Amino acid sequence: MKRGLLLFAHGARDPNWAQPFEAVVERIRSAAPEVAVALAYLDFMTPSIVEAGDSLAAAGCTRVEVVPLFLGAGGHVRKDLPLLVERLQHAHPDVEWLLRRTVGEDEAVIAAMAQCALQPSRSE
C-alpha cells in the first residue's frame, strides 16, 4: 500500500498566499519522504483537487488521505469537498480516498494557535 496525502486549501488570487501551505508540503516531504504529497486548491490556483488526486493515483498511491487545510469546517469542507472526493473515487476506484477533518479542529493546531497568540508582539 502506497500512502498519499492530498492537502486541500481554498486558494487566492495572490500567489504569496500559498507560501505557508507550500511550507507544510516541504516539511511533510522532509519528515516522511516515503509519503506522496500533493497540494490542491478549490479556487484561483492550480492544481485543482481532481488534478492533484489524479497525479497521486498515477504515482501508484492506493490510499490517499484528503486533509483540508482549513481552520473550520464551513460550506466548502462540508459540501464542496465531499463531492470532489466522490469524483476522485469514481475516477480511481482502486484507490481508497479518506476524507479527514480540518486541521483547525485538531488539538495540536488549536494549542499552537493559542501559543502563538500569547507570544509577545515583535517588531517586523
Image (cartoon, rainbow, N blue to C red):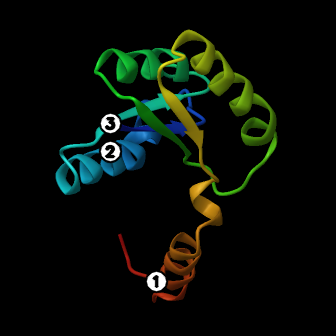
The crowd level at tag 3 (other Cα within 10 Å; few <14, some 14-19, many 20+) is: few
**Dot 1 corresponds to which residue?**
121
Dot in front, 2 or 3: 3
**Dot 2 corresponds to which residue?**
25
In terms of depth relative to the viewer, which is nearer, 116 or 123? 116
In terms of depth relative to the viewer, which is nearer, 15 or 112? 112
Horizontally, residue 81 falls left or right of residue 21, namely right
Residue 39 percent location from the top left of the image: 42, 33
- Mark 1 and mark 3: span between their CA atoms? 46 Å
In terms of depth relative to the viewer, which is nearer, 114 or 3? 3
Question: Could you tell me the amino acid type at mark 2?
Answer: Val
Horizontally, residue 124 falls left or right of residue 87, namely left
Residue at 53% of width from left, 23% of height from top?
49
| Quadrant of the image occupied by residue 62 | top left
Asked if marks 2 and 3 touch (Cβ < 8 Å), the reply is: no
Residue 59 percent location from the top left of the image: 28, 20
Residue at 39% of width from left, 20% of height from top?
57
Q: Which mark is residue 1?
A: 3
The crowd level at tag 1 (other Cα within 10 Å; few <14, some 14-19, many 20+) is: few
Q: Does dot 1 land on a helix, a strand or a loop?
A: loop
Sequence-wise, the earlier of marks 1 and 3 is 3
Question: Would you say residue 26 is visible in this rendering?
Answer: yes
Dot in front, 1 or 2: 2
Asked if marks 1 and 3 touch (Cβ < 8 Å), the reply is: no
Horizontally, residue 94 falls left or right of residue 22, namely right
- Mark 1 and mark 2: span between their CA atoms? 28 Å
Question: Could you tell me the amino acid type at mark 1?
Answer: Ser
